[in-house]
Image (tube, rainbow, N blue to C red):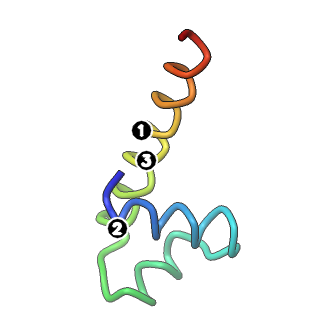
Amino acid sequence: MTADQQQTLELHLFEGYSLREIAEKNGQTLGNVKHHYYRALERLRSHLFSQKRG
């Protein structure tokens, strides 16, 4: 997971920021933040399922 993906995930899930707020806070487009967020979720999900299988 990239640093941007991790930061977006942490701000959204643990600190309660909306994706729009994260975009404004970081000077990014909402689309870019959504991309980071959903890619981070994909990587987290993939990691969790690989741990469960093996």
The x and y percentages for residue 5 are 39, 60
Residue at image coords 32%, 88%: 27
Compare residues 33 and 52 and report the one nearer the observer: 52
Front disc: 2 or 3: 2
Question: Which of label 1 and label 3 is nearer to you?
Answer: 1
Picture quadrant where residue 10 is located: bottom right
Q: Farthest residue toward the top?
A: 53
Residue linked to disc 1:
43
Total numbered labels placed on residues in the image: 3
Inter-mark Cα distance, 1 to 2: 13 Å
Q: Which residue is mark 3?
A: 38
Left or right of 54 on screen, residue 33 = left
Q: Is residue 4 above or below residue 45?
A: below
Callout 1 amino acid: Arg
Distance in Å between CA atoms under marks 2 and 3: 12 Å
Q: Residue at x 68, y 75 (%)?
A: 15
Dot 1 and dot 3 residues touching (CB under 8 Å): no
- Label 1 – label 3 distance at C-alpha: 9 Å
Badge 1 element: helix
Residue 24, image x, y percentages = 42, 87
Q: Secondary structure at mark 3?
A: helix
Residue 54 is labelled as none
Q: Residues within 10 Å of mark 2 (few under 14, many from 20)?
A: some
Q: Which residue is mark 2?
A: 4
Instruction: Identify the residue at image location x=60%, y=72%.
Output: 18
